[in-house]
Image (cartoon, rainbow, N blue to C red):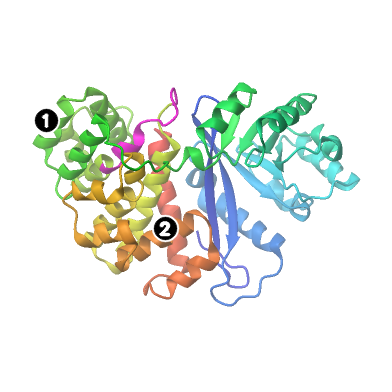
Amino acid sequence: MSGDVSSTTLFLGRQPILDHEGNLVAFELLFRASRSDDADVRDDLIATATVINHAFSEIGVDAVLGHFTGYINLSASLLMSDVIELLPRERVVLEVLESVEITDALLGRLRELRALGYRLALDDFVGDTGKYAPLLDLLDIVKVDVSAMDDARLADITARLRRWPVRLLAEKVDTRAQVDRCRALGYELFQGYYFARPSLITGVRPSHAGSTILRLIALAVDVPDLAGIEHVLRQSPALSVTLLRLVNARTNDRQHRIESLHDAADRLGAAELRHCVQLLIFAAPQVPGASFPTPLLVLAATRAKLMQLLACVTGDDRAGDDAFLAGALSLTGALLAQPAADMLAALPVRADVRDAVLTRSGRLGALLTLAERIEQTDIAAIERLLVDLPGLDPVRINDAWMGAIEWANTIAEA
């Protein structure tokens, strides 16, 4: 995505939102403006309006969201503007920032938006039902910040919110205990790092499934060893089914399903098959009962593809393959419940890939750090990193980011 607000490039980030069963149902979209070219953009309304226009008009809502819903943070000035009506009402939820002053004019505008068919949410609610009572009458969803609440306070706030017919979304969920507590209280939606970042547990032997997937990754580091992969998969039918789901997601052809690895290699090519194998570990739900795809799979696919596209700016296909692998492996050490160094020692990866994952060193390490900052929409850090990455600029980064999102969406959509 590239744009021009006084020559400013605009970035889009997204965080997954899940239902109570752990299924991915939406993304919160985050918009940031780059100042890398010293543009002086003081009007956040113009910047946000422009990026919304680019995201939903020029790129297309399907490229940004796949078939999911998009939650968008909006200031009072943007809520009052006509630009909101550019958004597809059936695809978005408008989030009212907690800092917005509740005035008669704002309430009137929210009634208009509801009449137009838009769904409304309140962001970062922490318990002041008295202050927000006029607003709560108009909302569809309340996002409750559970990060700093003990059990008693969360239960009290939840009970008070039951006076209104709103759906409750627990946000800033970082632990399994918070998930279980909010589920018991009847929360329907969840958002937080718990769902899209594995927790590091050191000193634990990897599970049999984890060891099997490491063997599969080793067999697909370069040209996939189809005979070796088939031999391993015969010992794990569940992994075989999951891999076929991944490769069929990449074809986007529901009438001619891929039913074997050889068929996958013929129709996808060696590189795409290799990437599917490398992402296989993220396809198993962390939340029991959740469906395919997992938020972690979407994150890993997006990060790996982003790194590949950024590396390929130099025209080096080998660098692109190594970058994809580094992006995928950067999330696997914690997921396998073993130190990353031990995990990498079991794989025949090149030294620059290993160094990138372990120490963020070398050009691949710099690209990995850049990918992580892009995920966080940390514009200041992105601009600092670009100084040491010749050939990359905000426009190329944005194009690669949107390409990575589209690629990951093909997996999610299937």
Residue type at mark 2? Ala
Q: Is residue 230 magenta?
A: no
- The quadrant of the picture occupied by the C terminus is top left
Write down the residue under mark 1: 231
**Picture coordinates of residue 223, whole percent (x, y):** 14, 48
Q: Bounds of the magenta span?
A: 278-290
Q: Position of residue 130 (x, y in %)?
A: 86, 36
Observer-nearest of 313 and 252? 313
Q: Residue at x 61, y 75 (%)?
A: 39
Left or right: where 12 falls relative to 100? left
**First along the sequence among labels 2 and 1:** 1
- Which residue sits furthest left? 227
Residue 204 is situated, as x and y percent measured from the top left of the image, at 30, 37
Image coordinates for residue 252, horizontal then vertical, percent: 34, 36
Quote the CA–CA distance across marks 2 and 1.
35 Å
**Between 58 and 280, the one nearer to me in the picture:** 280
Report whether 169 appears left or right of 127. left
Tell me if I can see residue 409 in this picture.
Answer: no
Q: Is residue 283 magenta?
A: yes
Q: In the rendering, which numbered label is found on residue 371?
A: 2
In this picture, is 174 found above or below 284? below
Type of amino acid at the residue the image marks with label 1: His
Crowd tier of the residue under label 2, counting other residues whose Cα lies within 10 Å: few below 14, some 14–19, many 20 or above: many
Disc 2 to disc 1: CB gap under 8 Å:
no
